[in-house]
Amino acid sequence: MKNITDSFLCFLYWPSAGSFGFDTDILATNLINLSVVLGVLIFFGKGVLSDLLDNRKQRILRTIRNSEELREAAIEQLETARARLRKVETEADRFRVNGYSEIEREKLNLINSIYTTLEQFENYKNETIQCEQQRAINQVQQRVLQQALQGALGTLNSSLNSELHLRTIGANIGIFGAMKEKKN
C-alpha cells in the first residue's frame, strides 16, 4: 500500500509544463487501468445483466410450466390406465372360464406400458431437476463473481480519494497525449 501512495505522491512533484514521463510503477498503473475497466463494465453491464437474468427467469418459468403440464398429462394417463385396468379386471372376472391366460397377458402388457411411461416421466423429471440444479449453481457462481468485483471496486474506491484520483487521471491523460505525439 505504501508503494501505491508513494507512486501517487510523485505526481505532486511533476513540473507543470513541458515534461512527460512514464510511470514505471506497474502496480499503480494497473490499479488505474482496473478502475477504468471496472467503471466501464459496471456502467454498461447493468442492463445486459438485468436482461440476461430476466430471460433466464422466463426460461425457468417456462420449464416449470412445461413440467407441470407433463405432470398433469401423466396423471391423466395414469387415471386412464387405471380405468382400463379396472375394465380389464372386470372382463377377466367375466371371461375367466374361457380365457384367463389371454386376459392376464393383456393385463401384464398394460402394466408394463404404464411402468415404461412412468419411468420415462421419472427420467424427464430427474433431467429437469438436474438442469435446474446446474442453472442454480451457475447463478450462484455469477453472484459470487459479482460480489468479488464489487468488493474489489470498494477496495479501490476506499484507497483513492477524489483529488488524488483526478490528479492520476490527468497525469495518465498527459502520458497518453505524449505517447500519441511520439507516434506521430
Image (spheres, rainbow, N blue to C red):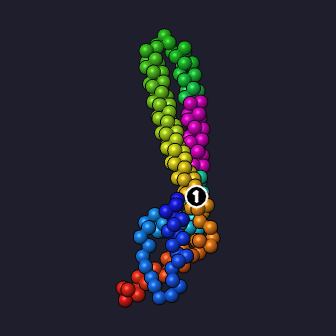
Q: Residue furthest front?
A: 13
Specify the principal SS of the magenta part.
helix
The answer to which image quadrant residue 40 occupies is: bottom right
Q: Residue at x 56, y 30 (%)?
A: 78
Q: Classify residue 53 as left or right of residue 20.
A: right
Q: Classify residue 183 as left or right of residue 92.
A: left
Q: Is residue 134 magenta?
A: no
Q: Nearer the viewer, residue 120 or 128?
A: 128
Q: Residue at x 51, y 73 (%)?
A: 10
The percent position of residue 163, horizontal first and vertical second, equals 62, 73
Q: Nearer the viewer, residue 28 or 19?
A: 19
Q: Nearer the viewer, residue 129 or 116?
A: 129
The percent position of residue 130, horizontal first and vertical second, equals 49, 39
The percent position of residue 147, horizontal first and vertical second, equals 57, 53
Q: Is residue 105 visible?
A: yes
Q: Is residue 50 visible?
A: no
Amino acid type at circle 1 is: Thr
The residue that disc 1 covers is 155
User: The C terminus is located in which quarter?
Assistant: bottom left
The stretch in magenta equals 60-80
Q: Nearer the viewer, residue 95 or 34?
A: 34
- Eyeballing the image, is 128 above or below 56? above
- Eyeballing the image, is 180 above or below 169? below
The answer to which image quadrant residue 68 occupies is: top right
The percent position of residue 132, horizontal first and vertical second, equals 53, 43
Q: Residue furthest right?
A: 162
Q: Classify residue 79 as left or right of residue 177.
A: right
Q: Residue at x 53, y 22 (%)?
A: 88
Q: Residue furthest top?
A: 97
Q: Residue at x 58, y 55 (%)?
A: 151
